[in-house]
Image (tube, rainbow, N blue to C red):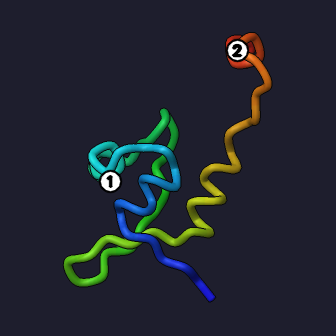
Amino acid sequence: MTQYLTSQSAANYLGYSTATLRNARHTGTLARVDAPTYKKIGNSIRYDKEVLDQWLSQFNNMTNTQQAQEA
C-alpha cells in the first residue's frame, strides 16, 4: 500500500525544512537536481514515500569529505 506523507513529514524524512521543500515545489529543484514529485489533493500536498526513496537513491553515500570533493 502506498504511503503518502504531508509536506512536514516529507521534509523531516528528507532532512530539509518545510520552507525548503515548499520552495522546491516552486523552483522544481532540490539539492541541485529535479525535486521529488508530489500530489495536490484538494488543498493538501502529499508526497509518495516510494518517490522520496527513489529521489534519495540518486545520491551516493560518502565515507569522508574527500570523496565529496572528488565527486
Observer-nearest residue: 27 or 21? 21
Q: Circle 2 sits in a helix, a strand or a loop, which is it?
A: helix
Image point 37% across, 48% down: which residue? Answer: 28
Image point 45% across, 53% down: which residue? Answer: 12
Provide the residue designation for mark 1: 25
Mark 2 residue type? Thr
Is residue 52 left or right of 17 when viewed as pictured?
right
Question: Which residue is situated farthest in the bottom direction here?
Answer: 1
Q: Of discs 2 and 1, which sits in the foreground? A: 2
Image point 27% across, 46% down: which residue? Answer: 19
Image point 26% across, 76% down: which residue? Answer: 44
Q: Quadrant of residue 67?
A: top right
Q: Quadrant of residue 68?
A: top right
In the rendered structure, which disc, 2 or 1, sits on the residue that comes first in sequence? 1
Residue 53: % across, % down:
64, 59
State the separation of the CA atoms marked 2 and 1: 29 Å
Provide the residue designation for mark 2: 65
Is residue 55 left or right of 17 when viewed as pictured?
right
Mark 1 residue type? Arg
Residue 29 drawn above or below residue 67: below
Question: Which residue is situated farthest in the left direction here?
Answer: 43
Q: How many marks?
A: 2
Observer-nearest residue: 4 or 40? 4
Q: Which mark is residue 59?
A: none
Q: Circle 1 sits in a helix, a strand or a loop, which is it?
A: helix
Which quadrant, please, contains the N terminus? bottom right
